[in-house]
């Protein structure tokens, strides 16, 4: 039994979800109000027999791992760790090196936490911090409660004040260097990094201090300064304020990304607690993934000058060397649009009024801030309009250059419907035939943007990764029209016992295991479903989140698309799945049958839940709702009959 199966077998989904949702028994199943969005009528069902859930109001469904990922905004690995801890399942024995690293990281966290407390007390009471107190209260209009909530602090204009304090509490100079609190120059002299500054503690998602942001108060440079990259401070993955914004983002399903720490603190003080900020670096895929796990919509609240005329255009294949300005944040539109397509995210842009920061807007008018965020435009619309402003759209040459400029943006959209929409939109704006625009885009050479997608920051080093070997991609996979599926073991599951499977056949695991042999077999399954007048297989058919990630990769491989960078935990889940033959005919038939049986299993579950929902609505004399559920039940029943008929026909053919 794999560790995932063991954790799943030990965690009762009814008991787990019951900690978040008030469940009531309904026949053999349980029902309750959706934990993902507000509703008055229960449409959330838990199925003990299959250890799965389905939320008919939001469309969410899955197993215990899916629930924790959605409800708590976790990755699959994080959900596995949390549930394994609850179930008493040991994931892996740590090596001596790993234990030492973990103990070292704990020491760094402890040093940073004590430094935050030290800085905070200085701000509250030290005479030397008077100008800092005046700045945060009179200029930034922060309340006493906000200062304490965010643990803002002040660092003395002294080269050794902090290091003397921490070494007196048992920390070594090397630990303070590793934590980014102490600097050692080439001559071996050591001194405090932060001196005479407003100090802003930066916390990870768990609320632990991992670094600091700071601002000079006397006009000295640098005006803003962060902790350096350390073992516990990863600028490419962190989002300032996420530990406090997480719950609101999940509830409102909208996250707002601003540029500055004070913008986050000010908006939170005004009651808008779904706001976070990056670390002053390019927006990374890791940051987008984090927000996508928590919310359906991501709003980029950007300064109009930087967003409209400078940084927003970086990465577009137009000669804009004048845009390179160090004091503007990097917002790579092509990278963002790639993230939007890859993550299936709704990313929007909200431009701030000239000369005003988010914290200033909410101070003047909270309603104005609310309207600005509500009216945020899709990022593609914003970028295209920004690019087009630089061309003479009344001149044929200007129109041609404009199409060339936006071609990389439109190409980066993975959804063909959206691509066609923007081609049509460009046709209207440029007064051109959309067919001519599409032809021009198809004929344009494919070149990489000068500003590549920002690299993910390393965990323990800022060193650049070596370029991949010829003939392989950045993940080390061979480049080919239909790349083979890699088969490494996931690091988090290394060393785990993967033996005997559960007695109940797992159709999801078996299907993914067969498709891993040959992704093209997915086409045969889709043909069979289409002939039965059913929808093709999609990721919603796969309830396990790790296996769902595998399905997405296999689906892309089956259609000749390049494989996305993704976790390969699903490979561990199928590692010991028994495939009795490599014969192509056998594998094709096994794929089709398993796909049909999986769809049948999912439809049966939906029928059961919809029947209960219909009965419940009728018992409450809510006839309109009962009729709505009944119509849906009839449609699902028709689909169930179709898939059962397809299975019978295949059985008859096999017998004959």
Image (spheres, rainbow, N blue to C red):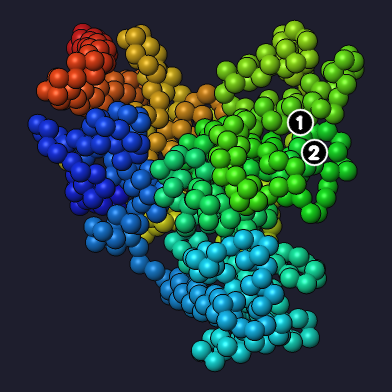
On screen, residue 528 versus residue 305, left or right, reads left
For the point 30% across and 28% down, the residue is: 56
Residue 357 versus residue 219 in the image, above or below: above
Work out whether residue 626 or residue 570 is closer to the camera in this orientation and state it. 626
Task: Indicate the position of residue 423 as horizontal and vertical percent values.
Answer: 69, 16
Task: Indicate the position of residue 343 as horizontal and vertical percent values.
Answer: 53, 36
**Which quadrant of the view contains residue 398?**
top right
Tell me if mark 2 has few (under 14), some (14-19) or many (20+) residues whose alpha carbon lies within 10 angstroms of its own.
some
Ranked by sequence position, the earlier of labels 1 and 2 is 2
For the point 31% across and 40% down, the residue is: 35
Residue at mark 1 to residue at mark 2: CA–CA distance = 7 Å
Residue designated by label 1: 386
Q: Residue furthest bottom?
A: 168
**Observer able to see residue 569:** no
Residue designated by label 2: 309
On screen, residue 167 versus residue 79, left or right, reads right
Q: Are marks 1 and 2 in contact (CB under 8 Å)?
A: yes
Residue 520 versus residue 465 in the image, above or below: above
For the point 26% across and 32% down, the residue is: 40
């Amino acid at each position: 039994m794999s560790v995932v199966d063991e954790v799943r077998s030990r965690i009762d989904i009814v008991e787990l979800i019951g900690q978040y949702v008030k469940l009531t028994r309904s026949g053999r199943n349980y029902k309750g109000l959706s934990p993902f969005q507000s509703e008055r009528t229960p449409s959330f069902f838990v199925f003990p027999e299959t250890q799965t859930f389905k939320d008919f109001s939001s469309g969410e469904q899955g197993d215990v791992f899916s629930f924790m990922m959605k409800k708590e905004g976790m990755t699959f690995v994080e959900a596995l760790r949390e549930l394994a801890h609850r179930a008493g399942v040991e994931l892996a024995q740590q090596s001596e090196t790993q234990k030492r690293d973990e103990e070292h990281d704990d020491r760094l966290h402890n040093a940073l936490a004590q430094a935050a407390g030290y800085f905070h007390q200085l701000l509250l009471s030290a005479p030397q911090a008077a100008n800092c107190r005046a700045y945060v209260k009179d200029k930034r209009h922060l309340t006493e409660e906000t200062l304490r909530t965010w643990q803002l602090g002040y660092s003395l204009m002294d080269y050794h004040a902090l290091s003397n304090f921490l070494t007196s509490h048992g920390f070594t100079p090397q630990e303070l260097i590793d934590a980014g609190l102490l600097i050692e120059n080439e001559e071996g002299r050591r001194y405090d990094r932060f001196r005479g500054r407003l100090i802003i503690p930066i916390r990870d998602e768990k609320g632990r201090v991992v670094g600091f942001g700071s601002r000079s108060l006397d006009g000295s440079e640098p005006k803003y300064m962060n902790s350096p990259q350390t073992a516990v401070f990863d600028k490419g993955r962190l989002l300032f304020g996420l530990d406090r914004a997480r719950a609101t983002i999940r509830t409102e399903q909208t996250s707002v990304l601003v540029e500055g720490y004070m913008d986050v603190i000010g908006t939170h003080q005004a009651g808008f607690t779904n706001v976070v900020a990056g670390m002053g670096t390019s927006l990374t895929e890791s940051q987008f993934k984090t927000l996508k796990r928590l919310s359906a919509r991501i709003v980029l609240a950007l300064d109009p000058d930087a967003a409209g005329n400078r940084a927003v255009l970086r990465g577009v294949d137009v000669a804009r060397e004048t845009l390179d300005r160090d004091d503007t944040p990097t917002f790579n539109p092509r990278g963002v649009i790639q993230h939007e397509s890859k993550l299936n995210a709704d990313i929007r842009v909200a431009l701030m009024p000239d000369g005003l920061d988010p914290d200033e807007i909410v101070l003047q008018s909270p309603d104005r801030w609310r309207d600005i965020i509500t009216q945020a435009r899709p990022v593609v619309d914003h970028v295209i309009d920004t690019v087009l402003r630089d061309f003479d759209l009344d001149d044929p040459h200007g129109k041609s250059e404009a199409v060339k400029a936006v071609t990389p943006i439109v190409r980066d959209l993975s959804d063909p419907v959206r691509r066609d929409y923007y081609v049509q939109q460009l046709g209207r704006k440029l007064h051109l035939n959309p067919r001519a625009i599409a032809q021009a885009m198809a004929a344009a050479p494919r070149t990489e943007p000068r500003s590549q997608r920002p690299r993910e920051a390393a965990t323990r080093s800022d060193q650049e990764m070596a370029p991949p070997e010829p003939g392989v991609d950045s993940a080390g996979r061979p480049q080919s029209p239909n790349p083979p599926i890699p088969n490494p073991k996931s690091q988090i599951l290394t060393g785990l016992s993967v033996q005997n499977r559960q007695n109940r056949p797992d159709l999801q695991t078996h299907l993914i295991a067969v498709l891993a042999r040959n992704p093209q077999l997915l086409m045969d399954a889709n043909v069979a479903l289409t002939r039965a007048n059913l929808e093709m297989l999609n990721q919603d058919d796969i309830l396990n989140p790790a296996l769902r990630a595998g399905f997405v990769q296999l689906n892309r491989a089956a259609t000749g698309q390049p494989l996305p960078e993704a976790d390969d935990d699903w490979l561990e889940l199928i590692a010991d799945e028994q495939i009795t033959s490599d014969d192509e005919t056998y594998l094709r038939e096994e794929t089709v049958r398993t796909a049909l049986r999986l769809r049948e299993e999912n439809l049966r579950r939906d029928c059961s839940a919809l029947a209960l929902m219909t009965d419940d609505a009728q018992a409450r004399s809510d006839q309109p709702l009962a009729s709505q559920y009944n119509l849906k039940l009839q449609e699902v029943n028709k689909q169930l009959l179709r898939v059962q008929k397809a299975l019978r026909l295949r059985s008859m053919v096999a017998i004959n």
